[in-house]
């Protein structure tokens, strides 16, 4: 047998293989996560989905030891972001901050290239959020009843904004339009922040927005709040009446936000993410911050969130049908 500096070729080869294996093993067995995680948001920065994602992303990153990078991919009512995540590798490094919008889109859009109930793995529901009816200060209405009268007296002249066609904000506006029997024009925006900007500027007159993104502007006097859309009053604004108390029986619309990933993620990765999210939402300082924005923290397993999503798809279907809204 040939020698190489006193070592046989066979022994040398065996040593090389062993050394390579020792180097490769940690890479193959690296614990998740060993690189940054992307959390995709289907709306522009500044809206409720983005705000919740950034609060949650920081907590997850601190807990798991890797940064969570928030990527805003607005457009098509969040479908661009959802399709992007549906096609991503199911390794746990590309996640979607999903919102009630996606449950609505299931019926609203005829030609979606993904199915919310079958093409994703649910991770955890994060928060539920009431919507609030807000108007520009120049609108001469201090209650829902006064706004309804104003709209009936001025048919076709008033615009209402939303964060995009098919969002819960849009659907709340359409439901109000139908129930009030008024002639108003819907102006969709690419995200709540853009809609709020124009509402404050007076380009549109009112909108149903998520409490977290709208309430700071109410407190500053830039907008006036008339009612919340949930069946019960909000802890953030206990003196503000509900739509039901304002004469719209059964008017109960809320938003929710959670985390999902591409179908096929490893179970241990999904469970690790779920544990991290639930731990974050259990922190008093995180709960206080979210509740201060009007959001109610949740606590679900992946299976519970999956069933919740299916129920939401079934619930919003008839609302979309009744509104007559469609996006091809």
Image: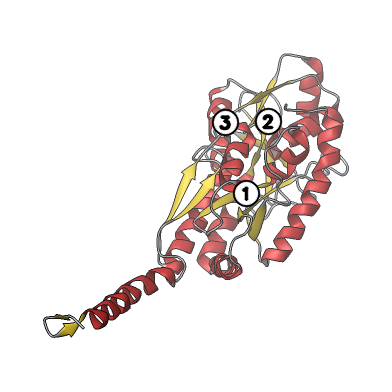
Mark 1–mark 2 CB contact (< 8 Å):
no
Q: Categorize mark 2 by other alpha carbons within 10 Å: few (<14), some (14-19), many (20+).
A: many
Expressed as whole percent of the image width and height from the top left, the position of residue 60 reads 48, 63
* Residue receiving disc 3: 190
At mark 1, the secondary structure is: strand
Instruction: Identify residue for label 2.
Output: 165
Q: Position of residue 147 (x, y in %)?
A: 75, 27
Spot the residue most to the front.
1
Q: Residues within 10 Å of mark 3 (few under 14, many from 20)?
A: many
Q: Residue at x 76, y 34 (%)?
A: 108
In the displayed structure, 75 sits above or below 41; it is above
> Quadrant location of the C terminus?
top right
First of labels 1, 3 by sequence position: 1
Per the image, label 2 sits on a secondary structure element best described as loop
Seen at 81% across and 23% down, the residue is 149
Q: Compare residues 87 and 106 and report the one nearer the observer.
A: 87
In the picture of the structure, the residue carrying the numbered disc 1 is: 98
| Quarter assignment of residue 284 | bottom right
- Which quadrant, please, contains the N terminus? bottom left
Q: Position of residue 183 (x, y in %)?
A: 80, 19
């Amino acid at each position: 047998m040939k020698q190489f500096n006193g070592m046989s070729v066979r022994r040398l080869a065996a040593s090389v293989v062993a050394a390579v294996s020792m180097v490769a093993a940690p890479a193959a067995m690296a614990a998740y996560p060993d690189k940054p995680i992307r959390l995709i948001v289907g709306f522009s920065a500044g809206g409720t989905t983005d705000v919740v994602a950034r609060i949650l992303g920081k907590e997850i990153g601190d807990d798991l030891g890797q940064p969570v990078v928030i990527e805003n991919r607005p457009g098509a009512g969040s479908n661009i972001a959802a399709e992007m995540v549906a096609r991503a590798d199911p390794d746990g490094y590309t996640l979607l901050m999903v919102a009630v919008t996606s449950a609505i889109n299931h019926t609203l859009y005829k030609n979606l290239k993904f199915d919310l109930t079958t093409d994703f793995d649910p991770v955890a529901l994060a928060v539920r959020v009431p919507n609030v009816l807000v108007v520009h200060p120049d609108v001469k209405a201090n209650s829902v009843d006064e706004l309804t009268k104003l709209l009936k007296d001025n048919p076709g002249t008033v615009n209402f904004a939303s964060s995009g066609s098919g969002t819960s904000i849009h659907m709340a506006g359409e439901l109000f339009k139908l129930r009030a029997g008024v002639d108003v024009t819907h102006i969709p925006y690419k995200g709540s922040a853009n809609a709020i900007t124009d509402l404050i500027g007076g380009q549109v007159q009112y909108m149903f927005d998520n409490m977290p993104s709208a309430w700071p502007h109410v407190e500053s006097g830039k907008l006036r709040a008339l009612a919340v859309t949930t069946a019960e009053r909000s802890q953030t604004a206990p003196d503000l009446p509900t739509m039901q108390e304002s004469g719209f029986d059964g008017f109960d619309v809320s938003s929710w936000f959670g985390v999902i990933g591409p179908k096929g993620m490893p179970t241990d990765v999904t469970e690790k993410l779920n544990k991290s999210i639930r731990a974050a939402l259990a922190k008093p300082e995180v709960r206080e911050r979210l509740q201060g924005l009007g959001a109610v923290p949740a606590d679900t397993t992946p299976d519970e969130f999956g069933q919740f999503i299916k129920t939401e798809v079934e619930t919003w279907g008839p609302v979309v049908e009744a509104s007559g809204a469609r996006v091809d």
